[in-house]
């Protein structure tokens, strides 16, 4: 199998994986809607500001990725850009954890005494997104190392491209989740 065909296969596998992840979150949001409609079983609470901060951070990180290909075309270093996205991904994770701390301060728990299905859904949605984000951070770590070693060029950046596609997907997914949690 030649390199071009292998690259196509790798991209197709990524898109299939993204479709599966999308179906998982769609089913979770559907369950959220059904449970929220169950009158008397849903506890309203204020969504912590850290989730809004994390939304801004992940959007900025995704936007930074769009500057990489033009830099590759100019044969300039992309290390700073990729490293910035990595740091912003870690910052996103930090803000998520701080948001969870604010939730527990409000008496919103995942499980146990005092927990409610509304809080449990929030934790599960945000935690599963964060777990998927860890995969993106691993990809960004690898891409950061390779960009530091100048291993990417305009003709050879598939690993970085796959990581960027995955990261953009996680960004869109988070914006949808955040909007759903904030406004629904």
Image (tube, grey):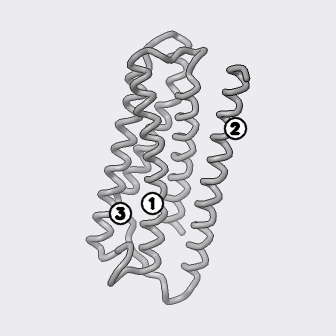
| Mark closer to the observer (2, 1) | 2
Q: Residue at x 40, y 44 (%)?
A: 57
N-terminal of the pair, mark 3 or mark 2, is 2
Q: Residues within 10 Å of mark 3 (few under 14, many from 20)?
A: some
Q: Residue at x 56, y 13 (%)?
A: 73
177, 126: nearer the viewer: 126
Residue 16 image position (x, y, % from top left): 68, 46
Q: Residues within 10 Å of mark 2 (few under 14, many from 20)?
A: few
**Location of residue 98 by image quarter:** bottom left
Mark on residue 48?
3
Q: Residue at x 66, y 50 (%)?
A: 19
Alpha carbon separation for disc pair 3 and 2: 37 Å
Query: Which corner quadrant holds the C terminus?
Result: bottom right
Residue 77 image position (x, y, % from top left): 43, 15
Q: Which residue is mark 2?
A: 12
N-terminal of the pair, mark 2 or mark 1, is 2
Mark on residue 126?
1
Mark 2 falls on what kind of element? helix
**Location of residue 114 by image quarter:** bottom left
């Amino acid at each position: 199998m030649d390199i071009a065909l292998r690259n196509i296969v790798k991209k197709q596998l990524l898109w299939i994986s993204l479709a599966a992840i999308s179906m998982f979150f769609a089913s979770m949001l559907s369950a959220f809607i059904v449970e929220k409609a169950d009158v008397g079983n849903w506890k309203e609470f204020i969504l912590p500001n850290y989730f809004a901060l994390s939304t801004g951070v992940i959007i900025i990180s995704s936007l930074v990725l769009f500057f990489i290909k033009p830099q590759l075309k100019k044969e300039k270093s992309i290390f700073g850009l990729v490293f910035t996205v990595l740091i912003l991904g870690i910052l996103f994770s930090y803000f998520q954890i701080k948001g969870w701390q604010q939730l527990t301060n409000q008496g919103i728990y995942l499980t146990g005494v005092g927990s409610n299905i509304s809080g449990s859904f929030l934790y599960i949605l945000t935690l599963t997104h964060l777990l998927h984000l860890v995969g993106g951070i691993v990809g960004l770590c690898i891409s950061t190392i390779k960009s530091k070693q100048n291993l990417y060029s305009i003709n050879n950046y598939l690993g970085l491209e796959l990581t960027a596609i995955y990261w953009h997907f996680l960004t869109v997914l988070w914006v949808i989740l955040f909007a759903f949690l904030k406004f629904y």
